Amino acid sequence: MEDMRFQRTEQLIMDATKSLLEKKGIDEIKITEICSRASISRNAFYGHYCDKYDLIEKMTMSFISTLKEDLLAIHGEVGESDLNKRTIECIISYFERNNDMLTLLVKNDSLFWHRFQENMASLLFVKAPKNSLQRVFAEFCSGGMCVCLESYYSGRAKIDHDEFVANLSYIARMASENNPAKIDKK
C-alpha cells in the first residue's frame, strides 16, 4: 500500500511539473507551485526529490527508461543484421509519440542529450563490447547518433523526416556491418 501511495505521489508531482513546464521553464517554477498543482505538501515533495533539478533529471531518466524497455523488446524480435536499423526506427517512433515531453525535457534539462547518449551506447549492439575497440566503437556510434538526433529535433538539421530516418538507418546498417565484434583485432 505504501509503495502505491509513493508512486501515486511521484506521478502527481511529475504531472504537475509537466503542466507547469508547458507554460514556463524549470528555472521560473517554484516548488510551492508544483506542490499546489499536485495537491501535496512541500515535505511530500522533498520526500521524493532533492530539488526541482533532481525532479527534471528523474523525469528525463523515466523518459529514457521507457524507451529502453521498447528497445530491449525489439532485441528479441529481430536478427542482428536488422537490429541497428530497427533501433533507430524505434527511437524515432518513440520520440514522435512523445514529442511534447521530449521538447519539454530538452528545453529544461541541459544534460538531456548527454543522459540519452550514456544510456544508448549499450543498446546499439546486441553483444556487449568485449574489448576496448568494441567499447570505443559503441561509444562513437551512440555519440554520433545522439548528435544527429539532437540536430534534427532541435531544427538545426534542415532535412525531410523520411530522408532523415532513411539516412540514419543506412548509417546504422553500415555500422552493424563494420562492427569491431566481427573484425579480429591485430
Image: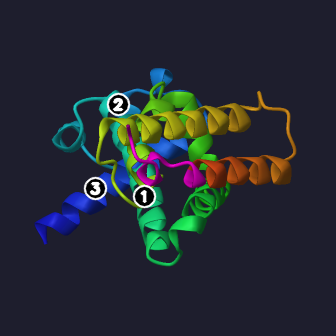
Q: Which mark is first along the chain, 1 or 3?
A: 3
Which residue lies at the image location 16% right of the left edge and 42% below the top edge? 47
C-alpha separation, residue under disc 1 versus residue under disc 2: 24 Å
Residue beneath label 1, please?
A: 68
Farthest residue, direction front = 186
Which residue lies at the image location 57% right of the left edge and 37% below the top edge? 146
Magenta residue check for 177: yes
Under tag 1, what secondary structure? Answer: helix
Mark 3 and mark 2 residues within 8 Å of each other at the beta carbon:
no
Residue beneath label 3, please?
A: 9
- Magenta-highlighted residues: 176-186
Q: Amino acid at mark 2?
A: Lys
The residue closer to the viewer here, 88 or 51, is 88
Which residue lies at the image location 35% right of the left edge and 30% below the top edge? 52
The quadrant of the picture occupied by the N terminus is: bottom left
Residue beneath label 2, please?
A: 52
